[in-house]
Structure formats: C-alpha cells, structure tokens
Amino acid sequence: MVPVTELRAIACRDQVPLSVIERDYVLSWLLWGIYQHPLLAENLILKGGNCLRQIYFPRTRYSDDLDFTTFRADMADVFMQHLAEVCQLVKITAGIDFVTELFWVQEKPTPHEGCTAIDARVYYRGIAGNASVTMKVKFDISEYEMVALPIQWHPLQHPYSDHDYCDVEVQTYSLEEVLAEKLRCWIQRTRPRDLFDIVSIIRSGAVPLAYENIMAAFLEKTIYKRVPLAGRDEMLYGAKFVQVETHWGPAIRCPAGSCLEANDAVMLFKDFIARLFTTDYIRLALGGLAPSWPISPTPAMAPPRFFGGTGQAAVPADTAETWADRQQQERFGTREAIIAAGRARRLIRLRYGDNDRDIEPYSFRYKNRDGQEYEYFYGFDRSRGNHIKSFFLHKIRGVSILPDSYEPRWEIEF
C-alpha cells in the first residue's frame, strides 16, 4: 500500500476530497484483481467513466463505480464467490482492508425481457482517513449491451507509487466504442457526465479517432441507420443543454486543471457533432453506400399527431419539411419530459393511442422487430394491467408530469 501522505498530497494537488482519491486507488487495485482472475478476466469488458479514467485518460473526471458488459452473466452467488476471491488477493497484495461481511451481490431486475444484470457492492475501511469509516464501491454488470467494434486489451493506468505491482492488461471497449456509447446515452438520458466524457475524448488528442468507426458504432447502437441526420438533430436538441448547464458543477468531479466550463463543453460538442455527421463519414459508416436523405422521418419514427379528439390526422397547411421538423421536435420533447420525470421519480400521464395512462418511467431501448428498428419506452402501467410495458416512442402522443411520486421497482436508467 502507498504511504498515507502520498494520497493526501494527491488530494491536495487535485483539489478533491481525500475520500475520492482513496476510492480511486481502491478501484484501480480491484481492476487489477479482476483481471488476475481467470474467469472474470475473459468475461468482463470494462466500459463507462472508469474505462476512460483507469485506461485511457488518468487525468479525466473521477468515477465512483465499475461498469462492465459481460459475455455471460453469472448467477449472483457465483459472482459473489469470484468477487470474494478478488478482494482476498487484493488484500494480500495491496493491504486494503475489505469488510467482507458487508458485501452483497444480487441479480438486478430489469424491465427488458431476456436481459440479465448484476448489482454488487464491495466495502472497505478508509485508508488515509479514519480507518473506522467504511466506504463502498459499486459494480454494475449487464449482458444486454450491443458491442459494435472489436474489444481491446490495454494496460491499467495506476498513477500511484506502487504502480509496478499493479500491472495488468484490462479488457475494454475501444475508444470509438466508448464515444459511440456515450452519444447513445446522451440522446436517452441527458447527464452532464456523458457530455463531459464525450468532450474529454474529442479534445484529448491522445488516441487518433476514426470518425467512420464512431459513426458506424453509433448507427449500430441506435435506430438511425436510415435517417442519420435525425440522430444529429436529437443530440443538438436545445433543452438538453439548458439542463446540463444547470447541473454541471455538482455533477463533475475532476482533478484541478482538467475541468471544463459547461458552455465551453457545449461548444466543443456541437462542433464535433457537426464534423461527425457529414455525408462522407455517414457513407463510410454505411459501407460506402450514398445515403438518401428523406425530407421527413420514416413513418416508424414520426407518425401523424391527432388533434381535437376526432381520430383523424390533422396536418397543418405548411410544408412537409416544416411538418417533419415539428414532429421531430415533439418527439425530442417527449423524451426529455420522460427523462425529467424518471430522474425526479414522478409519475407521468401518457397519451398512447386513444387512452391516457399513469406510468412509472424506467428506460429507453433500441430494438429490432421484424427487421425494423424502433425506440421503445419502458414504464410500469398503473392504469391498464398494472405491469411493465413497452411503448413505441414514436406513437406517444403526449406526456405530462404528475405531482405523484413512486418507489422504483427497477433501476431508473435516466
């Protein structure tokens, strides 16, 4: 274990709480232990914020948890055994004092059929602070994520004086895959940390980025293969930036000198999207085929809205292009309203078909059905059937947020 004075000095240098540095140190050693384990090393693919910090950019923002995609999700009791073995090895090697009696692992219920996820917590005693204080690390493991590009192995970045002992190769997403996944997340949940991670990647210059790979992976993870510019417009939806700028400071925790003002991040992001969504990159991502830009989204993405309760489509007397743009903006607003309600744990009243339903919001998913790709909203329907349901996002005709709160039955993914 490194001297306590070293951790305190790093906390002072980076201008972050000592507990943040302690957790970062423990996270690094846990990754070392996981990729020493013969079964976990081959099955777990690191992604998310700690993929960036622990593998690619050790001076980027701090992240509190370890996120993995898995080829095969173990049963909870099997993973608990593996995790205990990892922590025992780390304790022997690095001297970190884990509180094993507080460990827990459980299979996490998801509203998505056929999808398995594991939620886990590991507890340890404070290293540089009060040793009587118990701290935790969260594990989030899922097997339902789309991996579009080849997996890579990279050395763990361990910026502490015992780095010679914490030496291991980690199975991770490629940087282009991380970026494509963050772009997908940005559309579906609007979190400051996703925008920060995107901008951290594009401004680093540390690794050459293949724009066609990023675009290909993004299109593979979403529904935008036929209308890529709709994906661009969704990412640049104005209300998202207002929310991010409001919550930027408290949401981003990074070393001194690595921080970025919200308005600067937004400008860099918009410039990147403009460069990414060019005809050349889209053509390459689609396999060399020149895309044809429809004036309006396909019917699967933007159905007619209904007015006045007549049951007939009432199309305004303006151009098809203006109508298509209005339809897109309404869909974007629907998603943002659902995200806002889910994050606040508020019910929504959703108009779907000719019925109004009171719904607990949980997540969005892109799925293929009969060869056609759609975006689905998952929510618990309190009005009709009292169970989890999926709704085509493009068929939702209106959303309002109710004052009633709800106790989540599953993880809220916004």
Image (cartoon, rainbow, N blue to C red):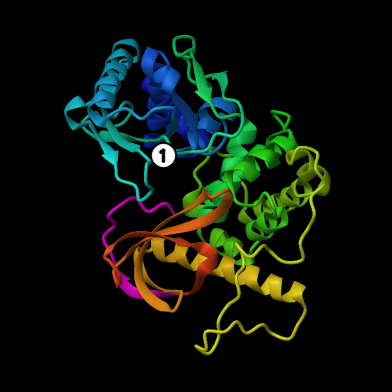
Q: Nearer the viewer, residue 352 or 13?
A: 352
Give the percent coordinates (x, y) of residue 321. 76, 72
Residue 56 as seen in the image, left or right of residue 319: left
- Is residue 129 shown left or right of residue 146? left
* Residue 259 visible at all: no
Which image quadrant is residue 350 in? bottom left
Residue that carries the numbered disc 1 in the rendered image: 17
What's the residue type where badge 1 is placed?
Pro
Dominant secondary structure (helix, strand or loop) of the stretch shown in magenta: loop
Residue 3 spot, x, y in % from top left = 38, 18
Q: Is residue 134 left or right of residue 18?
A: left
Q: Residue at x 60, y 47 (%)?
A: 183
Q: Is residue 316 above or below residue 321?
A: below
Report the quarter where the N terminus lies: top left
Q: Quadrant of the C terminus?
A: bottom left
Q: Is residue 203 above or below residue 55?
A: below
Query: To which quarter of the image does residue 31 belong?
Result: top left
Rate crowding at label 1 as few (under 14), some (14 to 19) or many (20 or more) other CA atoms within 10 Å.
Answer: few
Residue at 82%, 46% (x, y): give it.
290
Stretch in magenta: 400-414
Q: Is residue 42 above or below residue 309?
A: above
